[in-house]
Amino acid sequence: MLSQEVLRTDVAGMPLEWVDYRVAAILYHTEQVAYSCGSPLYRVRGGYNARTGLRSVIEVSSIIATRGEMHVAERNSAGYVPPLNNRTLFKRDANLCMYCGIVFRTSELTRDHIRPISHGGHDTWTNVVTACKRCNNHKGGRTPEQAGMQLIAVPFMPTYAEYIYLKGRRVLADQMEYLLSHFPRTSPLHARLRGDLARAAALH
């Protein structure tokens, strides 16, 4: 349970990053947490007060809003480009091969350039998709059209809030709901997360 990350936001509620319970406890202790929401995650016990003999306890919630963040606007602007890496790319595509439509383990997936680098393509969110090794080998250095293959979804570049979701190792239902409220209305992730939330609700 101690591996569960806390979602940190600014005072306006814009998502910033994931932090572990130790960082969250420090933020509480140094009074940088303006408010918290979501479900209680941890009770972190500290030292004993010499005067009262009572031990300090910090209640850490799943979502905490902190003071002092000044660089949110640029990350939430239309021009923001999140870093591209395979872990977040595969999560964007739900571990689906975008050619054969089958779900694979991460170790069986590759990053495919729709328009190959050798044809002038770029290593950008809108030119890469998740592909299984078999499909990627079959496509080779060709475009999907040249290889007679069809994409099952259009690749998209995530916004900062979407990227925060993609970076999360294990996103709790309340954190998912919170992040979902910051996604663009047109986000392809809406349907998937709504489905995840519905399944989570059905289990309780």
Image (cartoon, rainbow, N blue to C red):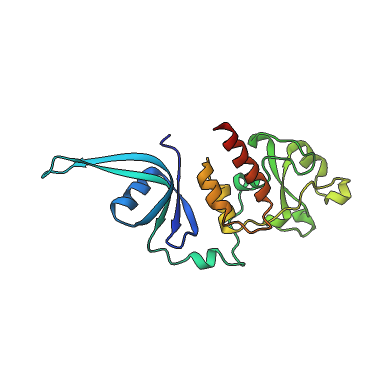
| Left or right placement of residue 137 versus residue 84 in this view | right
Q: Position of residue 189 (x, y in %)?
A: 65, 50
Of the pair 167 and 58, the residue shown nearer to us = 58
Q: Quadrant of residue 79?
A: bottom right
Classify the position of the C terminus by image quarter: top right
x and y percentages locating residue 107 in the rendered image: 64, 35
Instruction: Tell me what residue is drawn at x 56 percent, y 56 percent.
Output: 161
User: Outermost residue toward the left?
Assistant: 51
Q: How many marks?
A: 0
Looking at the image, which is closer to me, 5 or 97? 5
Please tell me whether residue 151 is drawn above or below residue 15 in the rendered image: above
| Residue 123 appears in the rendering | no
In the rendered image, is residue 16 in sight? Answer: yes
Residue placed at 74% from the left, 55% from the top?
117
Q: Residue furthest top?
A: 203
- Position of residue 183 measured from the top left corner of the image (x, y, whole percent): 60, 56
Q: Nearer the viewer, residue 39 or 84?
A: 39
Residue 176 shown left or right of residue 191 in the figure = left
Q: Is residue 80 above or below residue 149?
A: below
Q: Residue at x 79, y 43 (%)?
A: 99
Image quadrant holding the N terminus, namely top left
Depicted 102 relative to depicted 29: above or below: above
Residue drawn at x 32%, y 50% is 26
